[in-house]
Image (cartoon, grey):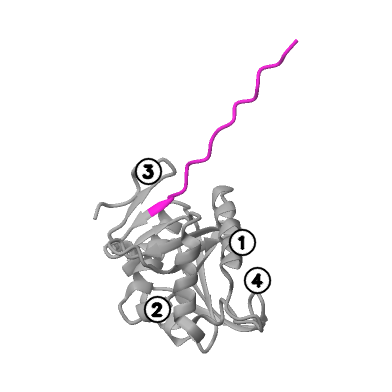
């Protein structure tokens, strides 16, 4: 005698595409490997922390492909969610951002990088604000973390502008295999603090796996 299959409740689709006033953020597709390599190679030493140059030279296209496959796999499995950021009109890749699950229970960590020639335009703040809104309004986290190296004054200043609180200097940390070991500055934002932050006012549209608008965002 056969038994009825157990009913599986599907988890809500995370946002696969986000639109801000000046950026389009979406999960990776195969064609992004070449766009990513161009963004990284053109930035030189600016992105050496994230993409160190080896004796063989800059990261190869095949290395970027391997990383993007892993990033997309994690995204589809509801693990870490990485987004590529583009200029909507030109399609030029401006950087990456994402929400990482290594922060603990009911918490996420925001991560990002921006190409060198996109700095100084407020785009990193706009990109990070989209992640802040997503973390608190879609994921419903209780805490969002932002880590940066002590010498990364741009990231520390951005964290403060967005309303993060500086908690302290973490000594001798290495959060991922590709990171260099060293001290990190830790900034956090709590769900009770989020409604009073500038990120809450960001105009944002979000779309799910099927391209359907998601109801928790505001129209542009």
Residues under labels 1 and 3: Cα distance? 26 Å
* Nearer-the-camera pick, 27 or 187: 27
Report which residue position mark 3 lands on: 211
* Nearer-the-camera pick, 193 or 109: 109
Sequence-earlier tag: 4 or 1: 1
Q: Nearer the viewer, mark 2 or mark 1?
A: 1
Q: Which residues are magenta?
A: 1-17
Q: Main secondary structure of the magenta part?
A: loop
SS at badge 2: helix
SS at badge 4: loop
Quadrant position of residue 100:
bottom right
Sequence-earlier tag: 3 or 2: 2
Q: Nearer the viewer, mark 3 or mark 2?
A: 3
Residues under labels 4 and 1: Cα distance? 16 Å
Q: Is residue 57 above or below residue 142?
A: below
Residues under labels 4 and 2: Cα distance? 22 Å
Report which residue position mark 2 lands on: 158
4 and 2 marks in contact (CB < 8 Å): no
Q: Residue at x 51, y 89 (%)?
A: 151
SS at badge 3: loop
Q: Residue at x 39, y 52 (%)?
A: 17
Q: Residue at x 53, y 36 (%)?
A: 10
Picture disc at residue 66: 1
Q: Is residue 48 above or below residue 23?
A: below
Report which residue position mark 4 lands on: 176
Judge left or right: residue 5 versus residue 19. right
- Whether residue 13 appears in magenta in the rendering, the answer is yes
């Amino acid at each position: 005698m056969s038994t009825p299959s157990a009913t599986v409740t599907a988890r809500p689709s995370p946002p696969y595409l986000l639109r801000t006033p000046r950026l389009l953020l979406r999960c990776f597709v195969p064609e992004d490997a070449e766009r990513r390599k161009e963004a990284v190679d053109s930035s030189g030493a600016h992105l050496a922390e994230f993409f160190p140059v080896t004796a063989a030279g800059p990261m190869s296209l095949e290395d970027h492909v391997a990383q993007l496959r892993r990033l997309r796999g994690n995204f589809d499995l509801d693990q870490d969610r990485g987004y590529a950021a583009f200029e909507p009109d030109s399609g030029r890749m401006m950087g990456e951002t994402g929400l990482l699950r290594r922060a603990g229970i009911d918490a996420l960590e925001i991560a990002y990088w921006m190409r060198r020639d996109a700095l100084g335009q407020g785009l990193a703040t706009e990109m990070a604000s989209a992640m802040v809104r997503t973390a608190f309004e879609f994921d419903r986290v209780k805490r969002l973390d932002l880590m940066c190296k002590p010498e990364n004054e741009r990231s520390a200043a951005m964290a403060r502008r967005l309303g993060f609180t500086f908690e302290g200097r973490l000594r001798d940390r290495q959060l991922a295999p590709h990171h260099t070991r060293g001290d990190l500055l830790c900034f956090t934002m709590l769900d009770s603090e989020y409604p009073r932050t500038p990120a809450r006012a960001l105009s944002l549209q979000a779309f799910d796996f099927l391209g359907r608008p998601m109801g928790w965002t505001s129209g542009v």
